[in-house]
Amino acid sequence: MRASSVSTTGCSSVRVRAMPSRGTTPIAGKNRPVLAPDLAGTVAHAGVDPTLEGRALQDALRRAIATRSGYCWWDVDHAGWVVTLSSPEEQTFYGRMLEEALAWCLVWLTVPELGSGRSWSDR
C-alpha cells in the first residue's frame, strides 16, 4: 500500500492510503444532506455554510478549524474517516465522510464559543 503526504492550510498533512475496493464509498448522495441537521446547525453557528458539498465544504471546515488555532490531519480506516486534532490538544474524531469528521473536530473547538464555559475534557 502506497502512502503520500500533502501539506494543507490549517492541517499538518494529509496521509492517503490506497484502499481495496469495497463496492461502495462513504459519499453522500444528492438526496441526502452531507451533515446531520444538529451538526449542520453547529457548523453554521461557527460560520461555515453547511449546504456546501464535497471539497468546498472540506475546505471551509479546515479554514474554520485553522481560524480557531486547530492543527489536524486525517486518514481512512475500515469504518470511515479519522481526523486527529493535534493542537490545541490531541483529540480524535470519526465520521463516515471526511466532512463529518472535520465537522465534529470543529464542534469540539467551538465548545467555549457556544457558551458552555468548559471544554469536553473537563467533563
Image (cartoon, rainbow, N blue to C red):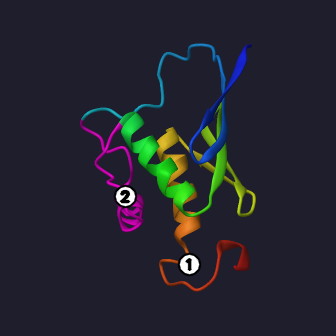
Q: Are marks 2 and 1 in contact (CB under 8 Å)?
A: no
| The C terminus sits in image quarter | bottom right
Q: Is mark 2 on a helix, strand or loop?
A: helix
Please state the horizontal and vertical placement of residue 96, each as a whole percent of the image.
Answer: 52, 40
Please name the predominant secondary structure of the magenta segment in the image. loop
Q: Give the range drawn in magenta.
A: 31-53
Q: Is 110 within the magenta? A: no
Task: Note whether residue 35 is visible.
Answer: yes
- Would you say 84 lies left or right of 53 here? right
Identified at 63% across, 82% down, the residue is 118
Answer few, some or many: residues within 10 Å of disc 2's Cα (few below 14, many 20 plus, some between 14 and 19). Answer: some
Q: If you read the primary sequence from the N terminus, does the residue marked by circle 2 or circle 1 appear first?
A: 2
Identified at 47% across, 78% down, the residue is 114
Identified at 65% across, 76% down, the residue is 119
The image quarter in which residue 14 lies = top right
Identified at 66% across, 73% down, the residue is 120
**What mark, if any, has residue 40 been given in the picture?**
2
Please state the horizontal and vertical placement of residue 3, each as a whole percent of the image.
Answer: 72, 20
Please state the horizontal and vertical placement of residue 112, each as a whole percent of the image.
Answer: 56, 78
- Would you say 95 lies left or right of 50 here? right
Q: Name the residue beneath numbered marker 1.
A: 112
Task: Note whether residue 80 is visible.
Answer: no
Q: What element carries label 1?
A: loop
- Depth-wise, is mark 2 or mark 1 nearer the camera? 1
